[in-house]
Amino acid sequence: MAKDLNEHSTADGVLEGVDLRGKHVFVTGAVSGLGAETARALVARGASVIGTAREARIHAETVAEIREAAAFGGSFEVVALELDDLASVRKAADALVERGERFDLVVANAGVMATPFGRTKDGFELQFGVNVVGHFVLIQRLTPLMREGARLIVLSSNSHRFADADLDDPNFEHTEYEPWFSYSRAKTGNALLALAFDLKNRDRGIRAASVHPGLIQTGIGRHLDPAETQATMKTVTEEREKAGKPPFEGKTIAQGAATTVWAGVVADPDVIGGRYCEDCRVADTLSDDEEADLLEGGVRPYALDPDHALAYWEMLERLASERD
């Protein structure tokens, strides 16, 4: 009988009874938050996971906990990688290519959110550079290592519904910068990245999907003003009450990792391929002009547009000087 999975499901619940012995997984940002929970749940089912970190030593306790969870031959290894530095990305990816490690699942999990304006070491606007460009270069270099039947899962966000990606000014050279606007554009970019990858690789049996993990308190929110966040949530809650909607319930980290492992391991690849997923299911599609509630789901059509996705991919190839 199929599992009854929903917004309350956890990564462990999704993977209950799943045997991942012999499976090899790569996860960015695997030593904290959602990435750490994703890695832990996978190694606990026997998977061999390679995770990335900027500085693994400061997360030694988390690394030890993930390794302690390993069962059935599962393992956890950490490699250094900084998504805001393409030299670092290429160095880490090329070392894996040299090793010849083959992957059944790649999870583009790491990211930054609502940061002050900044630029990566390669000159990209920070949120675009880390969330999208760094992962794009990494994925390009890891693609030859992905086995037939492998999957790519890219973490997006329901924030994508507030801004489409901008192919003309991705680095805010002519657009006024606003942290949440930039984040929304980058999260649309993540969805387009997954869709383009799926379109380009489905013929050889490799699929991809983007995932909204839910609203969760993790380290990615370190740039947010707690008072401002609390005020925003209070306003949204009051608006929901006036509209007769139920109170908002945030997710735990265990619940936040559920859709990632569902799409990456459990779901039918033909169901999730090229799609945007949330709450352990494929999200409903909103119209472009339909009002989006910050606390509710749905995906904008522009994040599912194949031509838009392939044009976005071509732009990334040009900007990062990284081609198939």
Image (cartoon, rainbow, N blue to C red):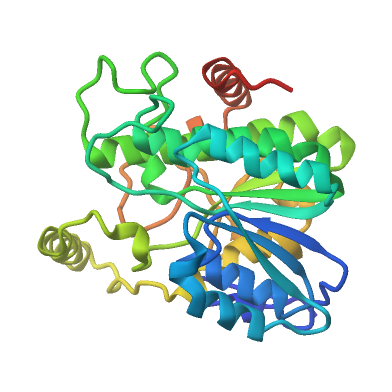
| Residue 262 spot, x, y in % from top left | 67, 65
Q: Residue at x 48, y 36 (%)?
A: 85
The quadrant of the rendering that contains the C terminus is: top right
> Is residue 178 left or right of 109 when viewed as pictured?
left
The quadrant of the rendering that contains the N terminus is: bottom right
Q: Vertical placement of 138 versus 315: above or below?
A: below
Residue 32 visible in this rendered orientation of the protein: no
Q: Residue at x 69, y 44 (%)?
A: 208
Q: Quadrant of residue 78?
A: bottom right
> Is residue 159 left or right of 19 when viewed as pictured?
left
The one nearer the camera, 240 or 224, is 224
| Residue 193 spot, x, y in % from top left | 58, 34
Q: Residue at x 60, y 24 (%)?
A: 313
| Residue 127 spot, x, y in % from top left | 37, 38
Q: Vertical placement of 185 versus 208: above or below?
A: above
Residue 53 visible in this rendered orientation of the protein: yes
| Residue 31 spot, x, y in % from top left | 52, 67
Q: Vertical placement of 180 versus 101: above or below?
A: above
Q: How many marks?
A: 0
Q: Quadrant of residue 304?
A: top right
Q: Residue at x 62, y 69 (%)?
A: 39
Q: Which residue, as the protein is rendered here, is positioned at the far front?
A: 57
